[in-house]
Image (cartoon, rainbow, N blue to C red):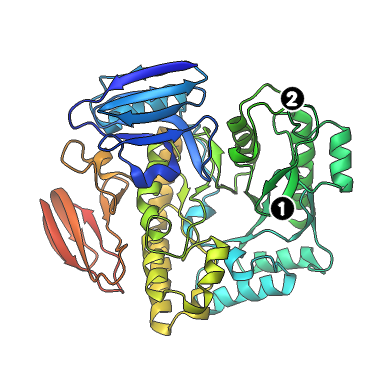
Amino acid sequence: MTQFKLEILKGEYWWGGAVSDGISMPFGGERFKRSLNPLASPNQANPVLISNKGRYIWSEKPFDFEWIDDCLHIDNAVGEIKWEEGYGDLRGAYKAVQENFFPPTGEHPDLALFSTPQYNTWIELMYDQEEQKILQHAEQILAHDMPAGVFMIDDNWQEDYGVWRFHTERFQNPKAMVQKLHDLGFKVMLWTCPFVSPDSATYRELRARDLLVKNSDGSPAIREWWNGYSAMLDLSNEQAIVWYQKQLDFLIEEYKIDGFKFDAGDPIYYRNDDQCARSIHANEQAEWFAKFGRKYSLNEFRACWKMAGEPIGQRLCDKLHSWDQSGLGSLIPNGIAQGLMGYAFTCPDMIGGGEYQNFLQNARHLDQELVVRYAQCSALFPMMQFSAAPWRFLTEENNQYCFEAAQLHVKFAEEIIALAKHASKTGEPIIRHMEYVFPNQGFAEIKDQFMLGENVLVAPVVERGKREKEIQFPEGTWYGDDGSIVEGPCTRIVCAPLSRLPWYRKK
């Protein structure tokens, strides 16, 4: 196994590795350790580290890294460690490693993902995905003057895991349902995963055809995940991919489904000694899953290994209904970490939090202020996604604030789409760290504000009860959403009532 040690420069900070560690970035100031070999994180990861001093580290294979006594230690690497310096700053380091190892493809996901809010049925319906409830939810969205957008039908619409057909008891006429959703102005996505329920006809067929992952002893791998125990498609097997694509393409052809939410498939469910068609590392099953899913332009992934620069919608993992770094507090640092690892087409988690068991525990005393601030924080991300219907449990006033956040996203749609097209050609993030846009000006450790492109500074309120926001402004003249004008560089405490998402445009 390769070992590597690099001395940290004075004032040097680093980003990279696992997106879920964005809350701990930048690295370098305190001791920190992350294992990518194999990955035990519910979100995207990329074997890359970049610094604000223009240095980068890359490996085609996973490695473990740790900061100890002003040194970066890399251990347990299964591939060659490559490092370069001399690229000036964070942007220079990012562009250098991106151009060499994960260049943009020139493609982007379906632009419908960016133009209006998305609506996911998970928190609203959970496992009760039924035809009439789905249509009622869609009609309520429009009845409350929310814009039609991408509509995601989540887990349990299907017959079984691996049987990707509408459940006949819950869906009496799925073709008419999808047509109705289209008529209402929605694009329709279906939830899917690479798992197969054992002791089923599908499992027996796939096992006989040797299309499933096997344990090191050759027996079928049956692994526990959040929905029980399942076998897993071997996504490194071309025939398994052919089988899976046939299932999904039937849904497109028969029901006019527009795209898919690709869930599960996390590296944590695989092992390095699994028997597969190709000799691969556990993380690579997630990589092959993304290679498969990118064929569908309307897509969403939550877990991913490598595949930066590809036309894939990458959502942050399910968050708690909380203010801390398990919930709202993670959106900005983890969102900008996605961009610095090459995942430009980013989406925060469902507004209010998508971790359903936690949401259920809080169902009787949901924090209305949190939901409003969550919607505002999401509004100027590349994508924003509702699930729990805000009009169902918020006061009229607080629901209005969420509506205004959605309208702000629509107002910025043309600008966000232009940035998405730019990202597809250049690889540059859509939302950017302050240090990325304004290098070496003291912004490296800022975690609660970000740039949308080059000229829009966004500073959401992410602390309970706060009605003011301390914002660090770079050089230039900044025109606020409230009509104010700020001359930078400066630090300014601005008024931020619950009705306001502070944002400023540089002129």
Badge 1 crowding class, 10 Å Cα cut-off, few under 14, some 14 to 19, many 20 or more, is few
The type of residue carrying mark 1 is: Gly
In the picture, the disc for residue 252 is none
**Measuring 63% from the left and 47% from the top, which residue is drawn there?**
264
Instruction: Say whether residue 59 is visible.
Output: no
- Residue matched to label 2: 277
- Residue matched to label 1: 228
* Residue sitting nearer the eye, 113 or 1: 1
Element type at mark 1? strand
* Residue sitting nearer the eye, 154 or 354: 354
Residue 305 image position (x, y, % from top left) = 54, 35
Cα gap from disc 2 to disc 1, whole angstroms = 25 Å
* Residue sitting nearer the eye, 176 or 339: 339
**Measuring 88% from the left and 41% from the top, which residue is drawn there?**
204
Residue at the extreme bottom: 396
* 202 to 174, vertically: above or below: above
**Measuring 23% from the left and 28% from the top, which residue is drawn there?**
53
Residue 11 image position (x, y, % from top left) = 18, 32
* 169 to 332, vertically: above or below: below
State the image quarter where residue 342 is shown: top left
The type of residue carrying mark 2 is: Ala
State the image quarter where residue 395 is shown: bottom left
**Measuring 13% from the left and 49% from the top, which residue is drawn there?**
476
Dot placed on the residue nearer the N-terminal end, 2 or 1: 1
Residue 280 image position (x, y, % from top left) = 64, 24
223 with respect to 342 (left or right): right
